[in-house]
């Protein structure tokens, strides 16, 4: 019996597809089953390099009976859960779908795993979350694993809720659940609604680049492959019931990211257009990754100055992802 039948949800999306490509290369003996609903953010092209090495199933993580049958048929004994609605602007416009997917979907997966794996199982469930569950920071300080949960958008509230459900399944049912909270990812395959690919697309088309407020909001940027390595470590070595913050210590103002993209593409800063700020726009995110460094020996390898050049060049050479 294969003890490495791993379900990866949401792997036709940005981080999930990067992770599966990384995971397959490192563990070719693993049997990877991908479950993705293929909403607008899911793209089968993201999986074209590995499609013959995985089992792909289209479906909804909120469908309990469907998920249960998938677990049984594929003898699932590990879960890495990426699937989520993730765009803050969309959550402001249509919050209900975020509660449905992020909360009910996560709960469904946990409940199915609990029912099939039985209490005391060592089978691993890694829940992938975000630093946005902590709310916002001022000029000083960092998010740690003990920072109180304090979400400010429907998106972050739905992720915070799913984090707490995951934690409850460890506390109540002793499931082998770990939670990861990452900072802003960047790199290949990211949907063009996100800041970096969106600004690259607009700049290449000589269109105006809309920047919320004064552009001084700060994010901690993490290259996606570094994130994949961290998740790998959490899956194999992370302690049950523990939360791990994953960040790159690359704090950048949004306006500086936009200016860097324009400079890299040889475009004028006259393309920048400041627009009305997003509702409830968090000022600053910054992660302290000391715990995962100390306990799992993880270090981000990619300097932002290198990663952003690699990312911009990738989108220039793969313009279909911008369309």
Image (spheres, rainbow, N blue to C red):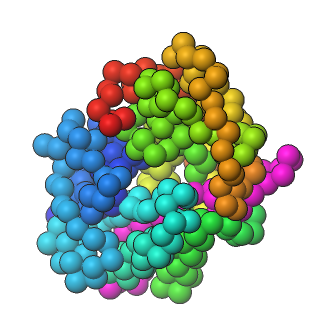
Q: Nearer the viewer, residue 60 or 93?
A: 93
Residue at the spot x=48%, y=69% of the render? 94
Residue 268 x, y percent position in the rendering: 60, 17
The answer, for residue 90, to whether it is visible in the render is yes
Q: Which of 265 and 317 is in front in this view?
A: 265
Residue 162, placed above or below residue 7: below
Q: In this view, does 219 lie to the left or right of 52?
A: right
Residue at the spot x=85%, y=46% of the render? 139
Residue 125, magenta (yes or no): yes
| Image quadrant in which you'd find residue 59 | bottom left
Residue 259 x, y percent position in the rendering: 64, 25
Count of numbered marks: 0
> Which residue extends farthest right?
140
Residue 206, placed above or below residue 144: above
Q: Is residue 87 left or right of residue 80?
A: right
Residue at the spot x=50%, y=44% of the render? 194
| Image quadrant in which you'd find residue 144 | bottom right
Q: In which quarter of the image is the C terminus?
A: top left
| Image quadrant in which you'd find residue 7 | bottom left
Residue 38 x, y percent position in the rendering: 26, 58
Residue 184, magenta (yes or no): no
Residue at the spot x=46%, y=35% of the render? 197
Q: In this view, does 2 lie to the left or right of 61?
A: left
Highlighted range, magenta: 115-143
Residue 62, placed above or below residue 285: below
Residue 220 x, y percent position in the rendering: 66, 42
Q: Quadrant of the N terminus?
A: bottom left
Residue 35, placed above or below residue 214: below
């Amino acid at each position: 019996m294969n003890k490495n039948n791993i379900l990866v949800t949401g792997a036709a999306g940005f981080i999930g597809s990067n992770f599966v490509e990384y995971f397959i290369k490192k563990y070719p003996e693993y049997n990877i089953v991908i479950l993705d609903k293929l909403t607008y953010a899911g793209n089968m092209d993201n999986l074209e390099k590995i499609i013959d090495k995985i089992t792909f199933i289209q479906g909804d993580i909120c469908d309990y009976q469907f998920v249960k049958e998938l677990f049984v048929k594929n003898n699932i004994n590990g879960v890495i859960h990426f699937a989520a609605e993730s765009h803050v602007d969309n959550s402001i416009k249509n919050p209900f779908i975020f509660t449905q997917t992020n909360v009910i979907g996560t709960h469904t997966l946990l409940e199915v795993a609990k029912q099939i794996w039985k209490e005391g199982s060592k089978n691993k469930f890694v829940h992938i979350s975000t630093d946005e569950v902590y709310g916002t920071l001022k000029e000083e300080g960092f998010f740690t694993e003990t920072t109180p949960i304090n979400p400010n958008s429907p998106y972050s509230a739905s992720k915070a809720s799913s984090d707490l459900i995951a934690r409850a399944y460890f506390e109540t049912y002793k499931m082998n659940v770990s939670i990861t909270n990452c900072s802003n990812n960047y790199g290949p395959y990211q949907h063009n609604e996100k800041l970096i690919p969106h600004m690259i697309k607009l700049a290449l088309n000589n269109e105006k680049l809309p920047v919320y407020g004064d552009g001084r909001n700060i994010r901690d940027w993490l290259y996606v492959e570094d994130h994949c390595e961290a998740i790998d470590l959490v899956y194999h070595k992370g302690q049950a019931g523990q939360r791990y913050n994953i960040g790159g210590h690359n704090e950048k103002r949004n306006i500086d990211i936009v200016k860097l993209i324009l400079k890299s593409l040889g475009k004028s800063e006259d393309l920048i257009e400041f627009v009305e700020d997003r509702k409830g726009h968090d000022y600053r995110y910054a992660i302290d990754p000391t715990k995962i460094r100390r306990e799992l020996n993880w270090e981000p390898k990619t300097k932002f100055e290198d990663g952003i050049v690699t990312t911009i060049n990738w989108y220039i050479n793969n313009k279909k992802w911008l369309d």
